[in-house]
Amino acid sequence: MSGIMEHILARRSIRRFTDEPVAASDIRRLLEAAMAAPTATNRRPWAFIVVTAPDQLARLRNGLPLGRYRAPLALVVCGNMRRAWPGPVQDFWIQDCSAATQNILLAATGLGLGAVWIGVHPIAPLRWHVAKTLELPKWLRPLAVVHIGHPAESKSPRTQYEEAAVHWQLFGGMPADLANPVE
Ligand SMILES: Cc1cc2nc3c(=O)[nH]c(=O)nc-3n(C[C@H](O)[C@H](O)[C@H](O)COP(=O)(O)O)c2cc1C
């Protein structure tokens, strides 16, 4: 299997971390990975809040009922509406920032770190909590909090491949070799 496939399958949500801080050089690489993500017409409508101060980490996680994990680093991925497309395609910021978030998770795996994506957008109370805690201006919309640290748990690589989720040519279609078996 190619390196990238192994890497993708090895990425798992890690929710337990040691107290060891994440090195500044690793934080930089995680951010470089985030900003290498594809975005619609390359607008890169994002901003990243790096949270390492223990009191600020505590405030942040305490308002996330499904994300109260103690990690030494949180990267908060935000959509920047000043750079997003105006009008009806503005919502592309969600895909753009999701691609950045996934790149952070994959880079964390590659650096030997653990990480978990905590969904914020579109849950209004979570958006308000994160925006208030981080003093975000109105034009920054939080998409996700990514807790990151050195892992204190390990999980096996895996795919969750499901044949039933795959359709060939049209909905319900089978691959040609199954549809026309050789006699
Ligand atoms: C949009 C999104 C929101 C998520 N929100 C949470 C969350 O609030 N809390 C949490 O523990 N995990 C959260 N996760 C992680 C998922 O639970 C996890 O990816 C899923 O169970 C599959 O496990 P795996 O990441 O180990 O493959 C979220 C993942 C995504 C993509």
Image: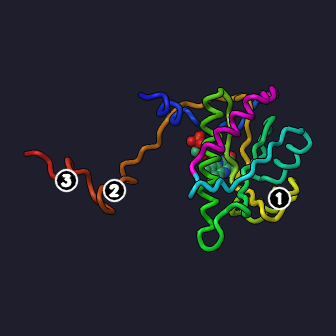
Q: Give coordinates of residue 121: x percent, y percent.
A: 70, 60
Disc 3 CB within 8 Å of nearest ligand 1 atom: no
| Labels 2 and 3 touching (C-beta < 8 A) | no
- In the rendered image, the residue lying farthest to the right is 55
**Residue type, mark 1 in image:** Ala
Position above or below: 101 against 43: above
Q: Tell me the number on the disc at residue 69.
A: none
Where is mark 2, residue-wise? 167
Q: Which residues are magenta?
A: 18-38
Q: Tell which tag, 2 or 1, sits nearer the viewer.
A: 1
Residue at image point 72% right, 50% down: 77
35 falls in the magenta region: yes
Disc 2 CB within 8 Å of nearest ligand 1 atom: no
Where is mark 1, residue-wise? 131
**Residue type, mark 2 in image:** His
The earlier-in-sequence mark between 2 and 3 is: 2
The earlier-in-sequence mark between 3 and 1 is: 1
Q: How many marks?
A: 3
Where is mark 3, residue-wise? 179
**Residue type, mark 3 in image:** Ala
Residue at image point 78% right, 27% down: 23
65 falls in the magenta region: no
Q: Quadrant of residue 19?
A: top right
Q: Is residue 139 left or right of residue 156?
A: right
Residue at image point 59% right, 69% down: 89
Q: Residues within 10 Å of mark 2 (few under 14, many from 20)?
A: few
> How far is disc 3 from disc 1 in space, using C-alphas?
52 Å
